[in-house]
Amino acid sequence: MCALSWGWQGPYARTVVVMTDQPFTAADLAPLVAGVPGAWRRFVDRYAGVIHAAVRGVVQDRAPTLDVADLCQDVFLRLCKDEYRLLRSFDPTRASLVTWLTLVARSTALDRVRRKHHPTVEYDAVPEAAMAVPPDVRERVEIPPGLLTPRQALVLALLYDRDLDPQEAAEHLGVDAQTIRSTHHKALTRLRQHFGAEGDGRAATTVQPGRRS
Amino acid sequence: MSDPIDPTGDRRLWQRVRLSLPEPPEPDLMTLAAYAEGRLADAEAEAVEAWLIHHPEALADIAAARSSLGAAPAPVPLPVVRAARTLAPSAQRAVWPQAMRWSSFAAAVVLVAFLGFQMGVATATSLIDPGLEDLSVEEEVFL
């Protein structure tokens, strides 16, 4: 059952705690998209907390000046727009509604942030790689398909492009840090073996700009 | 043990390699949600990760979605909930019948006012010049 409790959070801020102890199943979703009276209200009561938390996370990280309440309204509008077109696309057999709603909320909030706000990032928060002198990327190195798995390439991207440490990368991918170190090691070994085996062939696989192979 | 992350050679090599990696189309939110929960088949997960290589910032969204699963209910300002409740398409449709009711009421008021005005005019005419009517009656009788 959806339980509401009243309370005070901060000065003069009346809040309502929305319990999400019961999943909103496909059986609940059908009357909602069919426009049954009261279904939307139950949906809002159950998932306002999920949406609010997701939006607040984006605002805190990217644009503290934006109004969380406004962005939440944008998310709810997107969900019920065109007779719940977006909600109709939800497939309960693929993921839970909480996970999907969090992505919808963050994606909506990020769109708004990009449109209306030029984010300012603290100096310390910028990865060192982003501030460094751009690498000499005039040469593009071709590698054979399958040399790196997407997961290995993604780990390299997180460590080298985003300047994350193995622990941070592990949290992003939902694995442990040792898996990241192992994947990183295997990826580098493959790259080094490939280019080491090619020797002078490395130059042959180098592509000059404007001469894509 | 941990592999030392070479800040120069390996990073530069990766940045040059990355340029040659193809960027697959952006997955939809449903696919990303399934990826976050680890429900995708290997091939689908690899396609998502191949896209994430070019958009690693999306991993923050996926991590947030993953952590939202077990999160405790968060307090929500009441105005947010109240405003959201009014957004249902059925509530939007209800605006039109309400407008119709107000229009009907306004039309009824206008009609009553018009009829009252007409009755008033007729009464006033008969009161102002009653002899004229009597005269015409007499003339009709005489003729």
Image (cartoon, coloured by chain):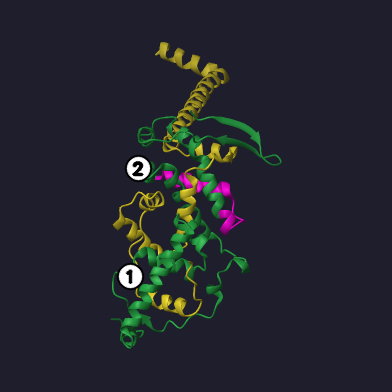
Chain colours: A green, B yellow
Left or right, B68 with reference to A140 = right
Q: Nearer the viewer, mark 2 or mark 1?
A: 1
Q: Which mark is residue A84?
A: none
Whether A73 is among the magenta residues is: yes
Residue B86 visible somewhere in the drawing:
no
Return the residue found at the far front: B1
Sort mark 2 into few (<14), some (14-19) or many (20+) by Cα contacts within 10 Å. Answer: some
Return the residue found at the far top: B141
The residue that disc 2 covers is A88
Q: Position of residue A4 (x, y in %)?
A: 56, 31
Q: Position of residue B31 (x, y in %)?
A: 35, 52
Residue A3 visible somewhere in the drawing:
yes
Residue beneath the point at 48% across and 60% down: A177
In the image shown, does B66 or B87 lie closer to the viewer? B66
Depicted A209 relative to depicted A151: above or below: below
In the image shown, does B54 or A46 lie closer to the viewer? B54
Tell me which amino acid carries mark 1: Pro
Return the residue found at the far right: A11
Identify the subunit bearing mark 2.
A
Sort mark 1 into few (<14), some (14-19) or many (20+) by Cα contacts within 10 Å. Answer: few
In the picture, the quarter occupied by the C terminus of chain B is: top left
The residue that disc 1 covers is B22
Tell me which amino acid carries mark 2: Arg
Left or right, A8 with reference to A98 = right
Q: Main secondary structure of the magenta part?
A: helix
Left or right, A8 with reference to B60 = right
Q: Position of residue A158 (x, y in %)?
A: 47, 66
Q: State whether discs 2 and 1 lie on one chain.
A: no
Q: Of helix, strand and loop, which one carries label 1?
A: loop
Q: Which residues are magenta?
A: A59-81
Whether A168 is among the magenta residues is: no
Residue beneath the point at 35% across and 75% down: B20
